[in-house]
Image (cartoon, grey):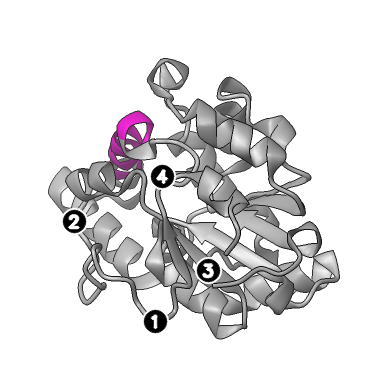
C-alpha cells in the first residue's frame, strides 16, 4: 500500500476498538442495555431480546436498523437510553503513543463512528483525543432522506466524500471492522485494519457468520496495523 502525499489524504478513523479498547470499556454494558431496552419496548423476554439483538447486528451491521425498520423504534431514543453507561470514564483506556501519532499524522482526520454523538464525545474528551480531529461524524450524521445509513452502507461513504469534496481514492479508512472496510474499498478507498484490540473483541463477541478469520488479511484490506504510529512510516 502506498500513500504518496499524506498531507492531501483524508483519514477516516473509527472509534470503538480502533482508537480505544471498547470491548473492555463499553461493549458489554451497551449490549446489556440494548437487551433491556428491547425487553421493555418490544414485550419480549431477555432470551428473545438477546437473540433478536444479535440477529439484527449480523443482518444490518447495527441493532438500531433492525429496531427502526421492523418495530418502529425511535432511533434517537434508543441511542440515548442504551448509551448512558455509568462509570464509563473509569473503564476507558487507549494508547498514549497512538494519541501522539494522531497529532503528528499529516492530512485531514475525520472520526467516522456508528456510535451516538454524546457517547463518542464523552470517550474522546476523556482520552484527550478530540483535539486530534478536524471533524467528528457520528451515527446521527449518517441519515439520508430520513433513513439511517450507518457503516457499512456504501451510500453513506459516498455522501461523506461528496460532503468533504474529496474523491474516495484520496481517503483512507482505519477500522477494526472488516465489513466496513469491504464497503469502503468497493468505492476506491484505501483501507487499514487496526488489530490492536482484536483479541479483546474476539473474547467479547463471536465473529459474524461467514466473516473472514481475524488472522487472514482479505484482499480488500490494504494494510494491517497494531498502532497508529505505523501510519507515519513510508508505505
Task: Determine which quarter of the picture holds residue 61.
Answer: bottom left
The residue sitting at 51% across, 77% down in the picture is 183
Q: Residues within 10 Å of mark 2 (few under 14, many from 20)?
A: few
Mark 1 to mark 2 CA distance (whole Å): 22 Å
Residue tagged 4: 17
Residue 37 sits inside the magenta stretch = no
Along the line of sight, which residue is nearer the eye, 75 or 185?
185
Residue tagged 2: 206
Query: Which of the two discs, 4 and 1, labels the residue nearer the N terminus?
Result: 4
- Element type where label 2 sits in the image: loop
Select label 1 or label 2 by which is in front. 1
Mark 1 to mark 3 CA distance (whole Å): 10 Å
Query: Which of the two discs, 2 and 4, labels the residue nearer the N terminus?
Result: 4
Residue 30 sits inside the magenta stretch = yes
- Element type where label 3 sits in the image: strand
Mark 2 to mark 4 CA distance (whole Å): 15 Å
Q: Residues within 10 Å of mark 4 (few under 14, many from 20)?
A: many
Residue 78 in picture, x, y percent from top left: 48, 45
Query: Which of the two discs, 2 and 3, labels the residue nearer the N terminus?
Result: 3
Select label 3 or label 4 by which is in front. 3
Mark 4 to mark 1 CA distance (whole Å): 21 Å
Q: Which mark is residue 191?
A: 3
- The residue at the far front in this view is 234
- Element type where label 4 sits in the image: loop
Query: Which of the two discs, 3 and 4, labels the residue nearer the N terminus?
Result: 4
Q: Which stretch did the figure color magenta?
A: 24-36
Taking the image as drawn, is residue 48 in sight? yes
Residue tagged 1: 219
Residue 124 in picture, x, y percent from top left: 60, 31
Quadrant holding the N terminus: bottom right
Mark 2 to mark 3 CA distance (whole Å): 23 Å
Along the line of sight, which residue is nearer the eye, 186 or 83?
186
Amino acid at each position: 500500500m502506498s500513500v504518496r502525499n499524506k498531507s492531501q489524504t483524508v483519514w477516516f478513523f473509527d472509534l470503538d476498538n480502533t482508537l480505544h479498547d471498547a470491548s473492555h470499556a463499553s461493549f458489554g454494558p451497551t449490549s446489556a442495555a440494548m437487551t433491556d431496552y428491547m425487553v421493555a419496548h418490544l414485550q419480549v423476554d431477555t432470551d428473545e431480546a438477546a437473540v433478536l439483538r444479535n440477529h439484527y447486528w449480523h443482518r444490518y451491521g447495527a441493532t438500531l436498523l433492525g429496531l427502526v425498520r421492523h418495530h418502529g423504534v425511535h432511533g434517537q431514543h434508543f441511542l440515548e437510553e442504551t448509551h448512558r453507561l455509568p462509570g464509563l470514564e473509569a473503564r476507558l483506556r487507549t494508547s498514549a503513543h497512538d494519541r501522539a501519532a494522531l497529532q503528528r499524522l499529516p492530512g485531514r482526520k475525520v472520526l467516522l463512528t456508528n456510535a451516538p454523538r454524546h457517547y463518542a464525545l464523552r470517550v474522546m474528551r476523556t482520552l484527550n483525543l478530540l483535539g486530534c480531529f478536524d471533524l467528528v461524524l457520528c451515527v446521527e450524521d449518517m441519515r439520508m432522506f430520513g433513513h439511517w445509513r450507518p457503516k457499512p452502507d456504501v451510500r453513506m461513504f459516498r455522501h461523506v466524500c461528496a460532503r468533504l469534496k474529496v474523491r474516495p481514492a484520496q481517503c483512507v479508512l482505519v477500522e477494526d471492522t472488516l465489513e466496513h472496510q469491504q464497503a469502503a474499498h468497493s468505492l476506491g478507498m484505501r483501507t487499514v485494519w487496526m488489530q490492536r484490540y482484536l483479541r479483546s473483541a474476539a473474547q467479547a463477541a463471536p465473529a459474524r457468520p461467514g466473516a473472514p478469520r481475524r488472522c487472514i488479511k482479505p484482499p480488500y484490506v490494504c494494510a494491517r496495523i497494531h498502532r497508529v504510529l505505523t501510519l507515519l512510516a513510508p508505505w
